[in-house]
Amino acid sequence: MFTARSAFSAIGRRAFSVSAQQNSKVTVLGAAGGIGQPLSLLLKLNPRVSELALYDIRGGPGVAADISHVNTKSKVTGYDAVPEQLKAALEGADIVLIPAGVPRKPGMTRDDLFKTNASIVRDLAKAAANHAPNAKLLIISNPVNSTVPITAEVFKSKGVYNPKRLFGVTTLDVVRASKFISEIQGTDPANEEVTVIGGHSGVTIVPLLSQSNHPSIDGETREALVKRIQFGGDEVVEAKGGAGSATLSMAFAGSRMADSLLRASYGETGIFEPAFVQSPLYKDDGCEFFSSRIELGPEGVKEIHPVGKVSKYEEGLIATALKDLATNIKKAWHLVPHSF
Ligand code: NAD
Ligand code: LMR
């Protein structure tokens, strides 16, 4: 398991052990933002990345110049907001991460960001479909429950959609879950793995504590822990007092997801990450996209694992999640027909 403590020692070790053939181009769209900058820095430390393309509507080249002085082997290039530069940033990319868009302020839900971010993601997805149709796409911009279905529709409209390569990044939910459960149990978060399923907002986030190392947590402790995992994002939004939402923990989570995909693409097996993907699990409930435990392979999604045995309490959480999630997905589909 990839944790804060293991991240840098692992990266350090791999700097010497990763073979020379592991050369990947990774592109960040929104690279000068609160997430984009630390995410780009962490990617610069990843020895599997040989080329880092940093694009933003403002500030991409500045961030790139700064990060390019870090003495790891990858080449870093910054791109300005003109179509030829966006094209150049995307061409040949193996992985494209999209943290472009506005973050929440206190009192807002992620769904409130739809107005602004849906069209930003749609337009960047169009560019990705045109110039990097085979890249694995990692959508960070909120509301993830809607921006991922929007991206899928854009790719379908261009005839290049492959559901194995599109991921809504929900890694931060499992990072939080393992940290929060360890705080309650007095354990090392490196040894805590909690499967989190559903979507990425409020009650659509469903931690399966019954499948964790501590299935007996119940009563008020369980109630509080589940709520904290579901609303961990709000904790950060409130603490930042109007200056944005989680950026550093998100950069860590995004970097972990990208690294897992890179390792899987070079043939490493047994790599599991949760992610919001096109999924058969709850399609009949109106949720064509769903986050669950995904096994990664060279193509991206290798296998979507079933949710498995859950408690009665968790059945209730899932039922509530599905209602909101179906609404978020439907909202995305309403935008799309008017978009092309
Ligand atoms: P930010 O405002 O600090 O940065 C966003 C960046 O996107 C800015 O640099 C901006 O210039 C850029 N941008 C805007 N429109 C663009 C476009 N069309 N093309 C390229 N770049 C563009 O915001 P942030 O804190 O980095 O958050 C970014 C997004 O990530 C938000 O929507 C936030 O809600 C989301 N987020 C998701 C998760 C998650 O778990 N998936 C976690 C945290 C934040
Ligand atoms: C998070 O979970 O921290 C992000 O989705 C940002 C937010 O708006 O809470």
Image (cartoon, grey):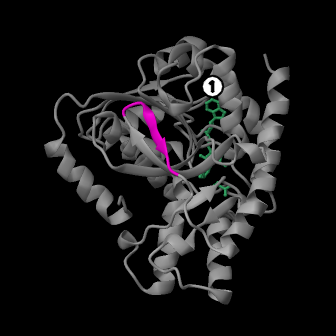
User: Who is closer to the viewer here, 218 or 260?
Assistant: 218
Residue for point 65% across, 29% down? 152
The quadrant the N terminus occupies is: bottom left
How many neighbours does mark 1 have within 10 angstroms: few (below 14), some (14-19), or many (20 or more)? Answer: many
Ligand 1 closer than 8 Å to label 1 CB:
no
Residue for point 66% across, 88% down? 219
**For the view shown, which residue lies furthest in the top direction?**
84
Q: Quadrant of ligand 2?
A: bottom right
User: Who is closer to the viewer here, 25 or 205?
Assistant: 205
The relative height of residue 261 versus residue 177 in the rendered view (above or below) is: above
**Residue 4 seen:** yes
The residue to which callout 1 is attached is 125
User: Which span of residues is magenta-colored?
Assistant: 298-305
Q: Position of residue 104 (x, y in %)?
A: 73, 53
Q: Position of residue 319 (x, y in %)?
A: 76, 61
**For the view shown, which residue lies furthest in the left direction?**
16
- Quarter-wise, where is residue 201 in the image? bottom right
Q: 113 left or right of 223?
A: right
